[in-house]
Structure formats: structure tokens, C-alpha cells
Amino acid sequence: MITRLIIVCGLPGSGKSYFAKQLSEKLKAAYLNSDIYRKELYPNHRTYSEKEKQSVYDALLASTETNLIHHTSVVLDATFYKNNLRIPFYKLAKQLNCTCEIIYLNAEESLVKERTSKTREDSEANYSVYLKLKDLFEPIDKPFLTLQSTNTNIDSLLSTAQTFLLHEKK
């Protein structure tokens, strides 16, 4: 069985966390979520400063490495809005001879606004955070799959993702 690193990225409210969790269960892969790590690292007060964000991604990278070394595939769930946040994960996968696939989730802006207006289990990002990150999101510089999330198409998204993953090469 191939050990995989699957990066699920996208803006707040895109549905990436729900999708990534479901995908990890289908693939029997470890599920690592930046929001959960942020709450563990900063339980009392989160500033979302660049330093704080970097420490969250560093912790994700360390956990990813541990899993991949033990031949456990990983589904990473984070915004990954900057290329410099993605690069260490690409390098790690290459170093460990694992496949690295990227899935970008998107949703209609009206749906994002609806989703980010509600309290969500782990994410604290609201619509204004979505708008800010939308302007800052850097293009993904590797081949990737784009999925359009709705409130009713999780089965279709998972099926498309699994087909994509079956056909991706190192």
C-alpha cells in the first residue's frame, strides 16, 4: 500500500474540514487539522499572528513526518493559503518517498457566508477572515484537484477524490 500525503486546502467555509475528515476515514489515514492544533497549542488566547500560524504549521509538519515515517498516510486539513506553508510538506513527502496530492476545496461565496456565520466545531474563522484570506491566497504551484462543495454533495466529492488519488503518480 502506498503511503500518501494528501493536502486538503482552501478558504474558510469551503467545506474542507468536513470533506478531509470523511476522506481520511475512507482511506484509513491519519487526519491532521490546523484548527485543532491551534487550539491545543494556544488554548487560552489565539492571535493568528504570522508567528502563531507558523508554529501551527510546524507542529502539523512534525506530526505528518511521524505518521509518514510509520507508513501511515495523512490527510492534512488547513488553509495553506501561502506557498511557503506548502513547500515544507512537499519536501517532506519527497524526502520520505511518499506521494503528495493536493485537493483544493471551493464553495459559492453565498454558501461560505452562510457557513462562516455559524459557530463551527473547530474553526473560528468568520466571513471577514474568508475575505482577507481570499485576497492573500497564493496560486498552487503543483497539479491539484479542485472540488466545488455544496451542502449535499459529499458523496460525489469523495468519489471524485478517490478516483483522482487512484490515478495520481508520484
Image (cartoon, rainbow, N blue to C red):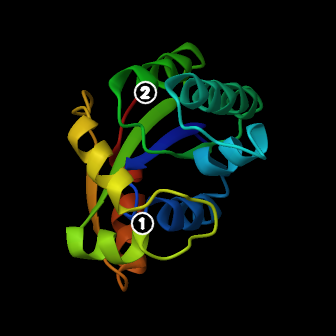
SS for dot 1:
loop
Q: Say which of 38 and 62 sits in front.
A: 38
99 in relation to 13, above or below: above
Q: How far from the left and from the top, in percent, is residue 147? A: 28, 61
133 in relation to 120, above or below: above
Please tell me in which quadrant of the rendered image residue 111 appears. Answer: bottom left
> Label 1, label 2: how many angstroms apart (C-alpha)?
19 Å
Q: Residue at x 60, y 29 (%)?
A: 52
Q: How far from the left and from the top, in percent, is residue 160? A: 33, 65
Q: Amino acid at mark 1?
A: Gly
Other-residue count near label 2 (Cα within 10 Å), few / some / many at <14 / 14–19 / ≥20 = many
Marking on residue 15: 1
What is the quadrant of the C terminus in the image? Answer: top left
Q: Residue at x 35, y 42 (%)?
A: 168
SS for dot 2:
helix
Q: Residue at x 25, y 54 (%)?
A: 146
- Residue 108: tell me if it is visible: no
- Residue 102: tell me if it is visible: yes
The answer to whether 80 appears left or right of 109 in the picture is right
Please tell me in which quadrant of the rendered image residue 121 appears. Answer: bottom right
What is the quadrant of the N terminus in the image? Answer: top right
Q: Say which of 118 and 90 sits in front.
A: 118
Q: Amino acid at mark 2?
A: Arg
Q: How far from the left and from the top, in percent, is residue 54? A: 56, 24
The residue sitting at the bottom extreme is 152
User: Which of marks 2 and 1 precedes in the sequence?
Assistant: 1
Q: How far from the left and from the top, in percent, is residue 60? A: 64, 33
Q: Residue at x 68, y 26 (%)?
A: 65
Report the residue marked by disc 2: 86
156 in relation to 88, above or below: below
